[in-house]
Each structure stands twice: as C-alpha cells, then as structure tokens.
Amino acid sequence: MKRILVVDDERQITRMLRAALQSSGYFVEVANNGLEAFQKFEAEPPDLIVTDLAMPEMNGLELTQAVRQVADTPIIVLSVRDTDTMKVTALDEGADDYLTKPFSIPELLARVRAQLRRTPSEPPDNRPVKEGDFMLDPAAHQATLRGEELHLTPKEFELLELLLKNAGRVMTHKVLLRSIWDRQETLNRNICASSWGNSARNSTAAPEHVTSRVSPGLAIDSSRAARPKSNNSRSLLILYEKTTDFLCPLPVE
C-alpha cells in the first residue's frame, strides 16, 4: 500500500485530504508543519508528499529543499498562491507538481496517481508472515492455518496476504480493488447482495477470521477460532464487506 504524507497547518484540510486519499486506497500520515513532516519523513519515508506552502516552523519550500537533499520522493504542492512566480519557484526548488487552492479532489487524486506511476515499484516483500494461527510464505506461495495447508486461488492468496500484513486494520473496498484486482471502480452492490447467499452455501469453512466493519471494508482477526465445516479448507475465507444491511462478497479469481 502506497504511503502518502499530507502536510498542512489547517486541520480541516488535512482531514479532508486524509479521508479522500484513504478511501482511494492509500495509507496516509499527517503533519501540521514542515518540521514535523520532515521528522516523519526521516522516520519512515513516504511514497509521496502533499504539502502546503505557508506553514509555521518550516514552510513548504523549506520542506521541499530538505527532502531534495536526501531523496527524490514526489512532492505535490498545494497553495492559494497562484502567481507564475510562486509556481516557478516551488518547481525549481524541487516540487514535482503544483495545484492551486481551491482544487477538486478528483484532480488531486489524478495528479497523485500520475506521480506514483513515475516512481519505481518497490521489490515485493517475500518475508514469511506469522499472525495468530496463520502462517503465510509469499515466496513459496504457501499458507497454513494451525499447520493445515490452505488451498487458495492466486487472488485468494493475495487477499489473505494483504489482510495478514495489515492485521486488525480495516481494508476498504477501494483498497482491495486497487491492491488485488487493480481496479478503481466499485462493484455493483445489488449483484453482490443477491449473490451472497450462494457464496455462503458454497463455502467449506466458516469465515470467523474475516470480520466486517460498519465502514465498508474487511479486517482480519487472527484471535478468532476457526470452526471448519469439513476437513477441506479450499474456501477458508468468505470475503465480504458490510455496506448497509447486507453482506457483499468480493470477486475471487
């Protein structure tokens, strides 16, 4: 999951940006000034920075200069200053893009996607994952529950890996579609609702480990005890989200 650092001294702006970016499948950190942002950057470098210019402690230009001394992390500047001089200055100091306030969220998200496409992809993390009774080895493409091998499709394996690596954290519908199915559109919820019954009847194991939240999404709870209906663990997970009052299965390929 891509990490984005949002920097602005207006909390209303940071709340809005956090909500928009998180719902689009990004992990978001927030800082309220440039100094705090640079400290967070040094502790754990993000994949992209979205920053205001006028801030206390360290302004956006100073933050951009500091980051550019050590990294090529993409930086998008947000500012009410719409003069050519200010835009040129920010870009010359190392910013990769400049967006004038007020701006539309769809445009910001498009600019974020464009910047992230230009950054090299990180090598996959193939370290084994141990979470509760689950053991998952990405390199060997093997997953076990209490020592019993789980026979999963490639998409089921990817989804289990994502949930285990983010155990206890809600993975929203958009996060799952972006991370696993490389899609941004949402599923037809009416189709999901009508197909839920069939998915439940065809399951061979109870989905106790995957829990729904009021906010649409999935989280894995490895503390729950699984109670298989048979020795066949082929369909360990019924993958669903709670939207309003029905359970919606996600596509498994």
Image (tube, rainbow, N blue to C red):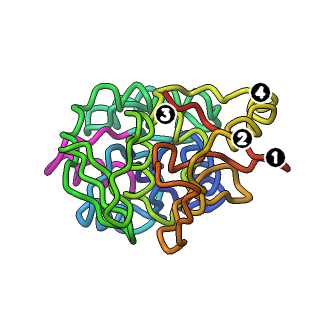
Compute the Cα span from label 1 to label 4. 11 Å
2 vs 3, front mark: 2
Horizontal placement of 214 versus 176: left or right?
right
The residue to which callout 2 is attached is: 248
Q: Are marks 1 and 4 in contact (CB under 8 Å)?
A: no
SS label for mark 3: helix
SS label for mark 2: strand
The residue to which callout 3 is attached is: 178
1 vs 3, front mark: 1
What's the amino acid at mark 1?
A: Phe
* Residue 56 vertical placement versus 46 (above, below): below
SS label for mark 1: loop
Q: Is residue 89 magenta?
A: no
- Residue 174 location (% of width, % of height): 58, 38
Q: Are marks 1 and 3 in contact (CB under 8 Å)?
A: no
Q: Is residue 60 magenta?
A: yes
* Residue 241 vertical placement versus 165 (above, below): above
What's the amino acid at mark 2?
A: Cys
The residue to which callout 1 is attached is: 246
- Residue 69 location (% of width, % of height): 14, 49
The mark nearer the N terminus, 2 or 4, is 4
Q: Residue at x 47, y 48 (%)?
A: 232
The mark nearer the N terminus, 1 or 3, is 3
